[in-house]
Structures are given as C-alpha cells and as structure tokens.
Image (spheres, rainbow, N blue to C red):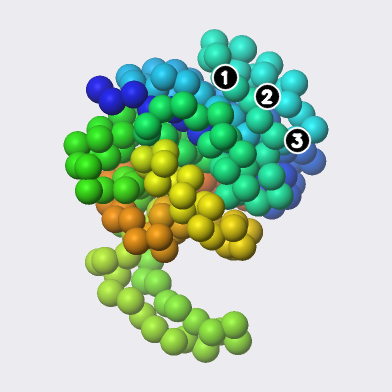
Amino acid sequence: LASATAVIAAAGSGERLGAGGPKTFVEAHGRSLLAWSLVAFKAAEGIEAIVIAGPPREQGRVFEVAERAGVEATVVPGGDHRSQSVANALEAVRTDLVVVHDAARPLVTAELIEQVVARLDRDPDVAGVIAAAPVTDTIKEASVSRRVLRTPERSRMWAVQTPQAFRTAGLRAAIAEHPDDLGIVTDDAQLVERSGGEILIHQASPDNLKVTTPRDLKIAEMLLAERSGT
Ligand code: C5P
C-alpha cells in the first residue's frame, strides 16, 4: 500500500459544542474525539507519520492524548482558520501523499483511510480523493435574504467528509495560489479544485459524522458504543 502522512486538523475552538474548551479534547464513549481518530490512523496500513495541528495554547495536552493512544505524532500550532491549520501541518509532511482529517470526525475507520489513499495512488491523473455520503435531504441554494435560487438535482449532491487524500505537492501549491481564501474555504479539496485539479468522491458511510453540536456528540457516542459492542 502507498505510504502517506496523516494531517489531523484539531485546532478548532469548539464554540458551537459549548464544552468550555477545545472540541478535540471532548470525550465520547471513553476517549477524546482526537484519540478516536488517532487510533483509526494508527490501525490504517500505509500511514507513515501523523502531524496534528492542535490548539496553539495546548500543545502539551495534544502530545499527551497521542502518547496515551500509543501514537508517535508531530504536533504543530493551528492557525486562525482550518485551512491555515492544515497549511501549518503540511510543512512537516515528508511523504508524496497526504491524507487530511478533521479530529471532529471520531467515527473514521482505518478501512476508509486506506481506501481514499489507495484510490488516489492508483490514478496519477487524480489530484485528490475525498470521502463523502449521498445527501438524503433536498438541497436548495438561497440568497442571503433566503430567497431560493436553485434546487440542484439531489441524486448528484454529496455531503463531504474527511479523510481527504491529496498529492502533497498539489495541495501545497493550491494553498500557495489562494492565500486569501484560507479563511473562506471549508474543505481542502476546494482549493485544489480551483487550481484545476481533478477530485474524486469515494462513497463513505453517513455514520462518519462531524461533531459540531451537542446533538452530534450524542449521536457519535451512540454509534461509537454500538461499534465497540459496549
Ligand atoms: O469548526 P469545524 O468543526 O468545522 O472544524 C473542522 C475541523 O477543523 C475540526 O477538527 C477543528 O478542530 C479543525 N480546525 C482547525 N483549526 C481551526 C479551526 C478548525 O484545525 N482554526
């Protein structure tokens, strides 16, 4: 299997979760959100190194979580925006392939990580492979005043997740080309798309949800409990 470095974005403030601290340290079914992701990356074949962009003032705590999860990781301070955190972490990446993941998705599996990396490695023309699930709701695009502008065909809409695998050089170049967009984009693939890179979707389970609100955390705990059979 191709070797890749994991970049874990874990520097968010977690304001919407209201846990009174960084989301990455919030516990779900006995482990912090960050630890769940680390355990999955540790189990994934071909992951050569792990770089974590953590909350700038809590680098020591990130190290502790990694140590307890039995993972050797490089920890770098995150930036003001998610893409800035990813850019910081990319500086420590030494492999040709990189797989970016949000620590807010504790239900990621080793299998999904291996699948996105393997798919990217198979096709030299592809710049990135991203996990996504088909949407079940109808999606409308609206103006700021909430007037509906468009209803895209639902069967072609995907809810995008992480992991997202890229060629390291391509992602670095895309970030360098769009420095002013780092505060606007919500996933890394967007930058690569804008640079003309071809991105493929790899269908993933909707269970690989992102913990944003207290409700998400409840659902994640349920799914983690179910998965570990306890
Ligand atoms: O805020 P949201 O949940 O969309 O963030 C997605 C991921 O990006 C989270 O894992 C969060 O820790 C990370 N993030 C980051 N640096 C920031 C903001 C968010 O690494 N400045």
Q: What secondary structure is marked by label 1?
A: strand
Disc 2 and disc 1: Cα gap in Å?
Answer: 9 Å
- Residue that appears at 44% across and 87% down: 149
Displayed quadrant of residue 119: top left
Disc 1 and disc 3: Cα gap in Å?
Answer: 16 Å
- Residue that appears at 56% across and 29% down: 92
Which residue matches tag 1? 73
Residue at disc 2, CB closer than 8 Å to ligand 1: no
Q: Amino acid at mark 3?
A: Pro
- Residue that appears at 41% across and 55% down: 192
Q: Is residue 182 visible?
A: yes
Residue placed most toward the observer, 105 or 223? 105
Circles 1, 3 touching at the beta carbon (< 8 Å): no
Q: Residues within 10 Å of mark 3 (few under 14, many from 20)?
A: some
Q: Residues within 10 Å of mark 1 (few under 14, many from 20)?
A: some
User: Which is nearer the N-term, disc 1 or disc 3?
Assistant: 3
Vertical side of 104 occupied by 61: above or below: above
Q: Which mark is residue 62?
A: 2
User: Which is nearer the N-term, disc 2 or disc 3?
Assistant: 3
Spot occupied by residue 176 in the image (x, y as percentages of width and height) = 53, 52
Which residue matches tag 3? 56
Q: Amino acid at mark 1?
A: Ala
Circles 2, 1 touching at the beta carbon (< 8 Å): yes
Q: What secondary structure is marked by label 3?
A: helix
Q: Is residue 167 left or right of residue 18?
A: left
Spot occupied by residue 10 in the image (x, y as percentages of width and height) = 62, 37
Circles 2, 3 touching at the beta carbon (< 8 Å): no
Q: Amino acid at mark 2?
A: Val
Q: Which mark is residue 188?
A: none
Vertical side of 89 occupied by 191: above or below: below
Disc 2 and disc 3: Cα gap in Å?
Answer: 10 Å
